[in-house]
Image (spheres, rainbow, N blue to C red):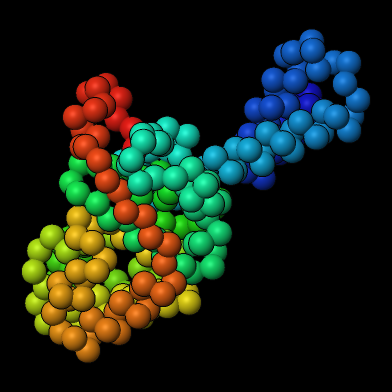
């Protein structure tokens, strides 16, 4: 009766994983020979692991990654691709996110930019860092809609809470004057307070022309480029090289 009461109390304390682990110990002969400290340690480990996993699940849902299954372990280091193991290993630590630095990932269509961006975002999530994924064109639409219904400050505050924003498909559609101003505000909000991971078919050297307004372009790129790690991908389309059953970066 006492142990059943203890299990019920664990549930009341919202220590469900610990309660389940205790029930498993009671049903397993392999745990009977362990001392109190060892068994207690296993219970605490079970609860911590469960909480970490639930936190990761919440972060993943909030991130809305386009390639949710992408992971660093599956990166394809094909020769002449422009992807070097030491650079990927360094970025996979997510120290650049902790330091509010940026990553600019460029290359032609199909070379795996989005996949690699999502794999790096996964690494940040594993470190407990909040991430959100947006295609640039969709984010600009969201900002415009929020301006129209009066919720723009709220949306900007929501974006500011993420440690990393993945901006996919940078520079595929023309910008309006308001778009440029929104980008300026976004980059400024990230300055020293958060990171951007940008993918683009357009080389960084052409971004100034893409942004249009020379003054805003200077301000945006000054905040982006000087705090950024840059990866330029080359080679054939990965969509042609990979089988339909398994896509890799």
Q: Number of callouts in the render?
A: 0
Q: Is residue 103 left or right of residue 170?
A: right
Which residue is nearer to you in this view: 186 or 153? 186
Quadrant including the N terminus = top right
Q: Residue 50 lies in what quarter of the image?
A: top right
> From the viewer's perspective, is residue 162 above or below residue 4?
below
Q: Is residue 70 visible from the viewing direction of this image?
A: yes
Name which residue lies at 66% across and 41% down: 48
Horizontal and vertical percent for residue 201? 20, 55
Quadrant including the C terminus = top left
Which residue is nearer to you in this view: 3 or 30? 30
Which residue is nearer to you in this view: 91 or 8? 91
> From the viewer's perspective, is residue 87 above or below residue 33?
below
Horizontal and vertical percent for residue 184? 27, 80
Q: Residue 195 lies in what quarter of the image?
A: bottom left
Horizontal and vertical percent for residue 136? 21, 62
Q: Is residue 187 left or right of residue 45?
A: left
Name which residue lies at 46% across and 57% down: 130
Q: Residue 138 lies in what quarter of the image?
A: bottom left
Horizontal and vertical percent for residue 229? 43, 62
């Amino acid at each position: 009766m006492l142990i059943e009461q203890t299990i019920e109390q664990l549930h009341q304390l919202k220590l469900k994983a610990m309660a389940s682990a205790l029930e498993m110990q009671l049903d397993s002969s392999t745990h009977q020979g362990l001392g109190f400290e060892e068994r207690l340690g296993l219970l605490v480990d079970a609860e911590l692991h469960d909480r970490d996993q639930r936190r990761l699940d919440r972060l993943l849902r909030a991130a809305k990654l386009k390639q949710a299954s992408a992971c660093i372990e599956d990166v394809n280091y094909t020769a002449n691709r422009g992807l070097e193991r030491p650079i990927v290993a360094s970025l996979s630590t997510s120290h650049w996110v902790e330091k509010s630095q940026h990553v600019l990932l460029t290359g032609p269509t199909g070379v795996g930019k989005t996949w690699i961006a999502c794999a790096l975002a996964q690494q940040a999530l594993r470190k407990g860092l909040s991430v959100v994924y947006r295609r640039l064109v969709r984010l600009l639409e969201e900002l415009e809609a929020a301006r129209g219904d009066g919720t723009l400050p709220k949306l900007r505050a929501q974006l500011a809470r993420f440690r990393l924003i993945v901006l996919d498909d940078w520079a595929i559609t023309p910008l309006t004057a308001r778009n440029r101003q929104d980008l300026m505000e976004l980059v400024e909000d990230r300055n020293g307070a958060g990171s951007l991971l940008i993918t683009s078919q357009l080389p960084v050297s052409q971004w100034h022309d893409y942004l249009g307004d020379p003054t805003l372009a200077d301000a945006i790129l000054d905040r982006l480029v000087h705090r950024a790690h840059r990866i330029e991908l080359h080679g054939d389309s990965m969509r042609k090289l990979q089988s339909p059953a398994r896509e890799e970066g």
